[in-house]
Amino acid sequence: SISGCARSHPYSVAMRHTQRQVLMNDPAWSSTRGNYYSAIPPHAGMKLAREIATVTYRSGPEWELRFGRRRADPSKPPALCPDFLIETYLDHAGEKWCLEYDANSLLYVSKAMDLFDLGKEHMDMLEGVRASNAHKLDQFAADKPTPKPESGSADLCNLTLPDTPYEEQESTAEIMNDNTDVKAATQDNEPPADLVKGMQGLRDIPALVLGVASDILFPAWQQREIAAALRKVGNRKVTHVELGEDRSLFGHDTFLLDLEGVGGELKRFLG
């Protein structure tokens, strides 16, 4: 597991939700409910979604060193279009990517990432869903038409608001007292019991768990959680490595860019 997790946490879910909302509010997507294949694709929504994603892939310290507060053209007056170097970088990243990837694919892959959870309760639920839908997979494999769902996609997107409005909690202690999982993850590095149960099947599998301190999308505590859960189930072949900011400032993209830090650890682990 390199910059991965055993369960998606609220921050990453929130960022992907925001990306999807930006994309789905592009008129080219919303006016067709995603059936844009014979029309103009939602390029604007895709570009903005990618810009948001790019912010989560890297780190502030890296961008401070790389771009600082420098402007693309200091001789011109400030403008609302891409002006600072960091803005031109995001604009380029979004523009390039929006022409290369399918919008609906992004929506479904993104939602699948939100739903990822190796906890036993969630895994048991998935087994039940797979069993109840096995006939649909068989029909699909046999190239037979499957019946349409009883409710339309619009019904699935209806927002159910809580009975009482959300209220900000006044202190960190209040949050900790209300949620033992949060306390375990942030203070004691103790994985939730349900997650430990869900990872029983990995007890005898040699594992390399590598995290990066500058990663804000899959923060290093999530890799510590994986390693701790594996050790809790009795796995004695767990190698946990955490690259500090003195070794990598690339954030989540470290797994793509740091050949020495990531590649070296992989080479040592694989022998």
Image (spheres, rainbow, N blue to C red):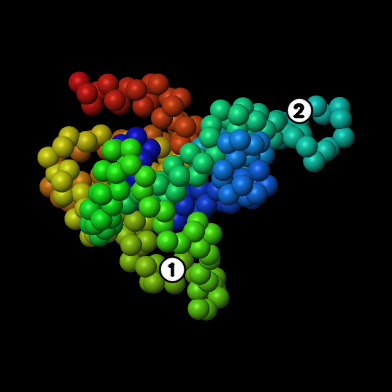
In the image, residue 101 above or below residue 125:
above
Residue at left offset 20%, top offset 49%:
199
Using the rendered image of the protein, determine whether residue 206 is visible from the camera's viewpoint.
yes
- Farthest front residue in view: 144
Q: Position of residue 211 (x, y in %)?
A: 36, 38
Residue at left offset 20%, top offset 21%:
271
Q: Which three-letter amino acid code belongs to the residue tagged 1?
A: Ile
Q: Position of residue 206 (x, y in %)?
A: 17, 34
- Farthest bottom residue in view: 164
Using the rendered image of the protein, determine whether residue 216 is visible from the camera's viewpoint.
no
Q: Position of residue 171 (x, y in %)?
A: 49, 69
The image quadrant that residue 141 belongs to is top left
Query: Between residues 268 and 102, which one lies in front from this camera angle?
Result: 102
Q: Quadrant of the N terminus?
A: top left
Query: Between residues 118 and 28, which one lies in front from this camera angle?
Result: 28
Q: Which type of secondary structure does the marked residue at label 2 adopt?
A: loop
Residue at left offset 61%, top offset 47%:
32
Measure the C-alpha gap from mark 2 to mark 1: 43 Å
Identify residue for label 2: 72
Q: Position of residue 40 (x, y in %)?
A: 66, 36
Question: Which numbered marker is on residue 175?
Answer: 1
In the image, residue 67 above or below residue 198:
above
Residue at left offset 16%, top offset 49%:
200
Q: Which three-letter amino acid code belongs to the residue tagged 2?
A: Ala
Tell whether 160 sits left or right of 238. right
